[in-house]
Amino acid sequence: AFRKAFALNYKSNPDVYAVQGYDAAQLLAAGLGAVKGAFTKRDAMLAAMNKTVVDSPRGKFTLSASHNPVQDMFLREAVGKNNEYKGVAVKALADPGRGCKM
């Protein structure tokens, strides 16, 4: 739905920044919804965000322990102005967060 609405409004496909913004908004909405908008309940908000499954244009994903997306990495080919899907390079790639203190 996001990709279609974006393409209709902007006459182009959403770039990586548009998709990341959309994903971030979903995470924030999940966190704020869990604490009924109370930003001061930071720990509860983050816990809810960590449990969220984001339904992204790049595919559904969750967050790793280091708060990075656990997601499939896709093979794509640039053809003219389009970025065409070719396959999946790695399924559910998670950043191990070595040295992360979160």
Image (tube, grey):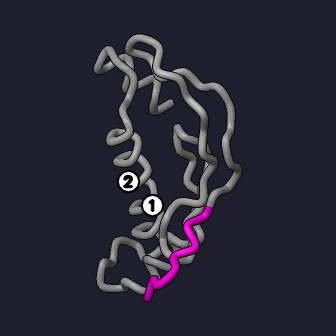
Q: Was residue 100 drawn as part of the magenta stretch in this picture? A: yes
Give how far apart the Cα atoms at labels 1 and 2 are. Answer: 5 Å
Give whichever of 60, 82 is nearer the camera. Answer: 82
Residue under the point 45% across and 83% down? 100
Q: Report which residue position mark 1 lands on.
A: 27
For residue 34, above or below residue 74:
below
Q: Amino acid at mark 2?
A: Ala
Q: Position of residue 68 (x, y in %)?
A: 49, 65
In the rendering, at what x and y percent does residue 93 appear?
63, 57
Instruction: Please identify the residue farthest to the top as the structure is shown.
Output: 80
Mark 1 in CB contact with mark 2 (< 8 angstroms): yes
Q: Give the residue pinned by disc 2.
A: 25
- Report x, y in % for residue 3: 46, 28
Numbered range of the magenta stretch = 94-102
Q: Relative to 101, does residue 70 appear above or below in the rendering? A: above
Is 54 left or right of 7, judged from the image as shown? right
Which element type, helix, strand or loop, lies under badge 2?
A: helix
Checking the image for residue 84, the label placed there is: none
The residue nearer to you, when weighing 51 against 77, is 77
Q: Residues within 10 Å of mark 2 (few under 14, many from 20)?
A: few
User: In front: 10, or 41?
Assistant: 10
- For residue 50: magenta? no
Q: Residue at x 51, y 30 (%)?
A: 1
Position of residue 45 relative to residue 18, above or below, is below
Label 1 Cα neighbours within 10 Å, binned few <14 / some 14-19 / many ≥20: many
Q: Is residue 88 left or right of residue 101?
A: right
Residue drawn at (38%, 29%), measured in percent from left and top? Answer: 14
Q: Quadrant of the C terminus?
A: bottom left
SS class of the residue under badge 1? helix
Please state the horizontal and vertical placement of residue 59, each as a whole percent of the image. 60, 43
User: In the rendered structure, which amino acid carries the disc numbered 1?
Assistant: Leu
